[in-house]
Amino acid sequence: MGLAAAYQAVKKGYQVEVLEADDRPGGMAAHFDFDGLSLERFYHFCCLSDTDTLELLDELGMNGAMKWVSTKMGYYLDGRLIRWGDPVSLLLAPGIDIVTKVRYGIQMFTSTKRSDWERLDKISARDWFTGWSGEKAYDRLWRRLMELKFYELSDEVSAAWIWQRIKRIGNSRKSLFEEQLGYIEGGTETLMNALAAAIEEKGGTIRYSKPAAEFIIEDGAIKGVRAADGEVFEAENVISTIPTPYVPALFGEAHADLAAPYEAIRNVGVVCVLHKLKKPVTDNFWVNISDANFEIPGIVEFSNLRPLEDHVVYVPYYMPQTNEKFGWSDEAFINQSFGYLQSLNPEIERDDLLASHVARLRYAQPVCEVGFADMIPDHVTPVAGLQIADTCFYYPEDRGVSESAKLAKKMVDVL
Ligand SMILES: Cc1cc2nc3c(=O)[nH]c(=O)nc-3n(C[C@H](O)[C@H](O)[C@H](O)COP(=O)(O)OP(=O)(O)OC[C@H]3O[C@@H](n4cnc5c(N)ncnc54)[C@H](O)[C@@H]3O)c2cc1C
């Protein structure tokens, strides 16, 4: 979001400086060297509705970089991997009665057509699922997915947030039976590097390993930003796109009253394990898991979207940071998740594991709770010249590259 905002601003002739805490561009979409392969720290796919990503690629001269693939989805339900994501799969799914299947099918189908969401913001995802499809459908198909992402917060998540996710993925298809997802050639790094290069080409500067520590506010207006090393960057306008949990510290004691709305927004963290294998686990891009022997809600077999020399699988463990599991060692996560892959595909042996990596984020997913629409502050703050946003500001849309780029453009229009 920060890079997209900087890019839009330099295009309009502003003199722009980007302060980035990390040593590389991209934030959650940044790459790292995974055993000789440049790969996202966290899996990234695109949907057909990601028009702002497509627009950026086009403007940056890379309109052929988006590759669309017919992907498959699976569901590992109580020890059995089944096909998932289309009406026939639903009808064939074991252990669900026909009435529940019809109710569930209607809920999913109408969700892809629906556009009003204000009422959904006022009820929990759980109440929405049970109201439409019944308790049995929730218990069998959604309970573990929600509980293994949000744990004790799962009953608080709003229906609007989950509905928007169902809609985005449900509509990313060629036909009722064919899902279509996209990846950027070379990974998200292609877009991040191109944005960074375009900003610098147009006269902007990007300062890496330069965390912002304080908003400098005088007489109700922003005057600049002080970096953690004390360097001061004077500015007439500041756009903050750091995760909201970090925002209150930038207001400091003197403006603590302005921090309250950001303090109220909760996030869950993620420990994302990545495995490189000689063999595929499944032929799906995404496998949901609801099985008492698995403490994960699913796996993302990335090489079934983006063709890679070896097979690459992400195993995300989302959880509130208060969960004791967050403190587990990398080795413990690697061993457990590899064991899960072996359970999913017993043909995988220890010798098939080529490399593993663990990436952690303290704030990976905002908890968009019931009534969240009223909790999000305006991105235009009461401080003249200061705008603040992160991925939850475009609720009910889920966090995503395209929506972040869209909001960035809106913020620059405010300038
Ligand atoms: C596990 C996971 C999977 C995802 N999958 C997808 C997907 O499939 N498709 C998709 O579109 N999106 C996906 N996303 C989301 C996507 O990565 C983000 O929405 C997108 O990167 C836009 O993020 P952002 O710029 O708003 O925030 P971020 O990427 O979090 O950027 C915030 C930036 O602020 C920097 N920062 C933090 N503190 C400071 C400070 N004090 N001073 C200066 N800089 C600071 C950080 O280093 C970071 O670069 C995923 C995210 C995660 C975590």
Image: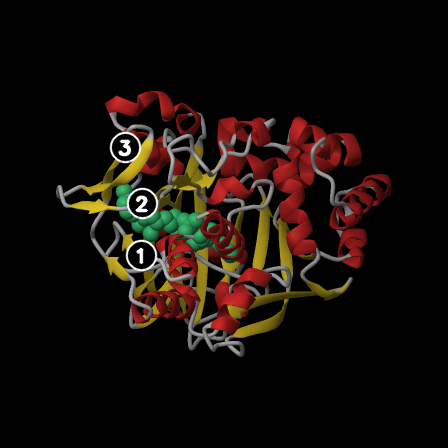
Residue at the spot 23% in from the left edge and 56% down from the top edge: 208
Q: Earlier in the sequence, mark 2 or mark 3?
A: 3
Q: Amino acid at mark 1?
A: Val
Quarter assignment of residue 128: top right
- SS at badge 3: strand
Q: Earlier in the sequence, mark 2 or mark 1?
A: 1
Residue at the spot 37% in from the left edge and 25% down from the top edge: 258
Q: Observer-nearest residue: 175 or 98?
A: 175
Q: Position of residue 223 (x, y in %)?
A: 27, 39
Q: Amino acid at mark 2?
A: Glu
Q: Disc 2 and disc 1: Cα gap in Å?
A: 11 Å
Tell me: 9 left or right of 77. Answer: left
Q: Is mark 2 within 8 Å of ligand 1?
A: no
> Total marks drawn?
3
- SS at badge 2: loop
User: Which residue was labeled with disc 3?
Assistant: 217
Q: Position of residue 201 (x, y in %)?
A: 31, 71
User: Which residue was labeled with disc 1?
Assistant: 16
Q: Disc 2 and disc 3: Cα gap in Å?
A: 11 Å
Q: Amino acid at mark 3?
A: Ile
- SS at badge 1: loop
Residue 130 in the image: above or below residue 209: above
Crowding at label 3, few (<14), some or many (≥20) Cα neighbours within 10 Å?
A: some
